[in-house]
Amino acid sequence: MSAHRTKVTDGGRVVIPAEFRRQLGLQPGAEVVLDIADGELRVRSARQAIERAQALVRKHIAPNTGLADALIADRRRSARAE
């Protein structure tokens, strides 16, 4: 992993070095997700954030079940229980 030193400009802007943008697949106008973990600012592409969320949810549903199908089935069970 390489490290780059940069500055925070007026308005809180930080330039993401071209090497990092390439590794993340970021193009101009791309959305990113920022979070703080263990005292560090982390930047992920929106695609990476979605894939991570899907992987976390997938642990809780049956294999070969679509995420949308599992959510719909869960909502229907909840509605019947009411």
Image: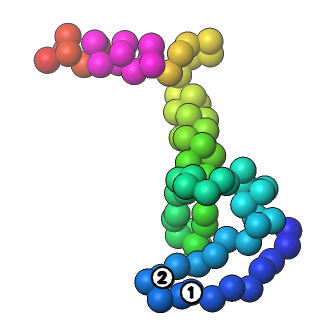
Provide the secondary structure element on which disc 1 rests: loop
Q: Residue at x 78, y 80 (%)?
A: 4
Part of the protein shown in magenta: 68-76
Report the colour scheme. rainbow
Circle 2 residues within 10 Å: few <14, some 14–19, many ≥20: few
Q: Residue furthest front?
A: 28
Q: Position of residue 67 (x, y in %)?
A: 50, 21
Assign the magenta stretch its main secondary structure.
helix
**In the image: residue 58, left or right of residue 11:** right
Q: Quadrant of residue 15?
A: bottom right
Q: Quadrant of residue 28?
A: bottom right
- Alpha-carbon span between mark 1 and mark 2: 6 Å
> Mark 1 sits on what residue?
8
The circle on residue 12 is: 2
Residue type marked 2: Gly
| Callout 1 touching callout 2 (CB < 8 Å) | yes
